[in-house]
Image (spheres, helix red, strand yellow):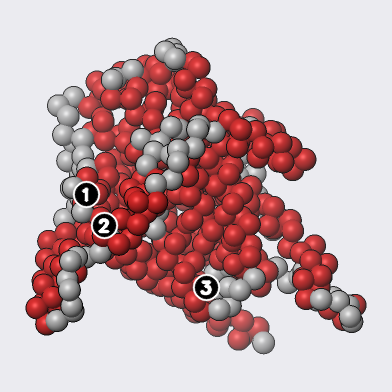
């Protein structure tokens, strides 16, 4: 038996090493076509001006900024609450192929893309902000809740219920065993919702990102830092003010304090579905004949070769480089917050830093770096790696703190890191990394809205030109690739026997 276990362990370690080396090699190859040029003539001077603002944070219009902060929290609270309920009921039917397919598609489309679509229907309204969060998050909740119910090993107590309906059986026999996992993940998803809500301001919705973009474009770095510090404070104190008993009051307050809901134009909805998203060759076609299908084929091929393929190439290149950069940064960061390397006073500073890094949305960080370095891939790689590396570093640091060392363990931190801790957490590290692979791809795609030539660049251009048929086609292509990455990620995790904690 020992020989079998040893052989199995050696196989897993060898497979994990081979996969790791392959991903690194692919990232190095992707560096060849990548654009990392810094365009401003003196970026370090701009950096100095930017960081000097932290010494004197100030807000020109406090009441307006507070209103946007309330909107940010309200959009997140209502969007996550709605998606939580929808996702829960979808998770009960997640075994059905159609439900899984729908959930996979809606969560594969980033909330900013959903917002850009909904803007064409509802305009800059509350409905757009709430639904932009609720739609993709419903798919995420359905998947994660289903996985929690499958993997938590809840006790089957159905034998205690003989003449009880199925709903009561579920509520009394299953929910008590998974409730803590549900609550923990929902709290984490609300933190994500706050970040998503904030960046919706960059496309015009009345959230914190709206003022942040204005302050940054005007070079008012004191206001930028004031807004960022407020946002970090909101995230870091989440455990203090988000209480279960206060949730009903928060929901009622969020509804009351939201901006005025504009009347829904059913003409806009009808036009969107009957005209705007219909492929151009099919508009006005009396009958579907060979000529119409030829025009449709040419329309699709033109978009695919001129926009989709270049966008896919740049998105995949940027994703692969960002994934490996995330991995390297996470391996560097996690010892800084691990009990096995530093005591509490030393860890406190690094824990605060990681909170700041993982609380800053990639889109927001990339926007700031683009103002300093120009529209190359470098700001995108740094933004994605910093945000995701901080998340994985935090999770690994917490996981490594529970490891038990032998009595003869090395006291050297370097030896402990290389020979004791990393080999034992590497499987969990890969699980976290592969789980965030699809998330990194989604973030890479939307950074095109900022001017980087990923798929988001072509999607945003199509929307700006009011060519929603092109935009929807490109969004569908983006979603399908994201679903493909998710499938590869799950197969890798399964083949490498990687266990995943839900809270990522």
* Among numbered discs 2 and 3, the one appearing first in the sequence: 3
* Among numbered discs 2 and 1, the one appearing first in the sequence: 2
**Residue at coordinates 26% horizontally, 22% vertically from top-left?**
46
Q: Which sits in the foreground, 489 or 447?
A: 447
From the viewer's perspective, is residue 428 above or below residue 265? below
**Residue at coordinates 65% horizontally, 44% vertically from top-left?**
339
Q: Position of residue 170 (x, y in %)?
A: 77, 70
Residue 290 sits in which quadrant? bottom left
Return the mark for residue 466.
1
Q: Which residue is mark 3?
A: 99
Residue depth check, mark 2 versus mark 3: number of the one nearer the observer:
2
Q: Which sits in the foreground, 449 or 126?
A: 126
- Secondary structure at badge 3 equals helix
- Are discs 2 and 1 less than 8 Å apart at CB? yes
Q: Position of residue 412 (x, y in %)?
A: 57, 46
**Quarter in which the N terminus is drawn:** bottom right
Q: Is residue 176 left or right of residue 311?
A: right
């Amino acid at each position: 038996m020992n020989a079998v276990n040893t052989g199995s362990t050696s196989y897993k370690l060898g497979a994990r090493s081979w996969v790791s080396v392959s991903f690194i090699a692919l990232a190095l190859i992707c560096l060849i076509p990548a654009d990392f040029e810094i365009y401003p003539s003196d970026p370090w001077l701009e950096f100095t001006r930017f960081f000097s603002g932290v010494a004197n944070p100030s807000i020109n219009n406090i009441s307006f900024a507070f209103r946007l902060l309330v909107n940010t929290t309200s959009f997140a609270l209502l969007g996550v609450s709605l998606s939580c309920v929808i996702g829960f009921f979808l998770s009960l039917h997640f075994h059905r192929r159609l439900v899984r397919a729908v959930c996979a598609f809606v969560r594969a489309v980033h909330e900013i893309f959903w917002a850009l679509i909904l803007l064409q229907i509802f305009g800059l309204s509350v409905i757009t902000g709430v639904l932009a969060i609720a739609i993709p998050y419903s798919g995420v909740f359905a998947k994660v809740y289903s996985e929690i119910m499958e993997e938590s090993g809840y006790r089957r107590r159905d034998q205690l219920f003989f003449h009880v309906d199925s709903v009561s059986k579920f509520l009394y026999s299953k929910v008590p065993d998974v409730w803590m996992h549900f609550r923990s993940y929902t709290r984490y998803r609300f933190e994500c919702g706050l970040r998503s809500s904030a960046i919706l301001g960059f496309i015009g919705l009345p959230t914190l990102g709206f003022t942040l973009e204005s302050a940054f474009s005007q070079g008012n770095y004191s206001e930028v830092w004031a807004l960022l510090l407020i946002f970090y404070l909101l995230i870091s104190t989440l455990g203090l003010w988000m209480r279960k008993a206060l949730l009903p009051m928060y929901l009622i307050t969020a509804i009351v304090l939201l901006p005025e809901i504009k009347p829904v134009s059913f003409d806009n909805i009808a036009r969107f579905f009957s005209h705007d998203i219909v492929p151009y060759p099919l508009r006005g076609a009396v009958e579907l004949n060979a000529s119409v299908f030829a025009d449709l084929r040419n329309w699709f091929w033109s978009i695919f070769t001129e926009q989709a393929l270049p966008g896919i190439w740049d998105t995949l290149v940027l994703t692969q480089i960002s994934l490996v950069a995330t991995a390297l940064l996470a391996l560097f960061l996690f010892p800084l917050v691990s009990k096995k390397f530093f005591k509490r006073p030393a860890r406190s500073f690094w824990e605060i830093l990681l909170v700041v890094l993982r609380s800053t949305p990639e889109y927001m960080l990339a926007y700031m770096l683009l103002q300093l370095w120009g529209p190359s891939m470098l700001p995108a790689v740094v933004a994605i790696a910093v945000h995701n590396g901080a998340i994985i570093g935090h999770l690994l640091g917490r996981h490594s703190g529970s490891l038990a060392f032998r009595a003869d363990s090395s006291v050297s931190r370097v030896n402990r890191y290389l020979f004791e801790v990393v080999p034992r957490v590497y499987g969990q590290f890969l699980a976290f990394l592969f789980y965030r692979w699809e998330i990194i791809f989604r973030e890479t795609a939307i950074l095109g809205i900022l001017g980087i030539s990923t798929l988001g660049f072509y999607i945003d251009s199509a929307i700006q030109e009011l060519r929603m048929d092109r935009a929807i086609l490109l969004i569908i292509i983006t979603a399908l690739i994201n679903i493909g990455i998710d499938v590869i990620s799950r197969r890798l995790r399964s083949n490498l026997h990687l266990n995943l904690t839900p809270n990522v």
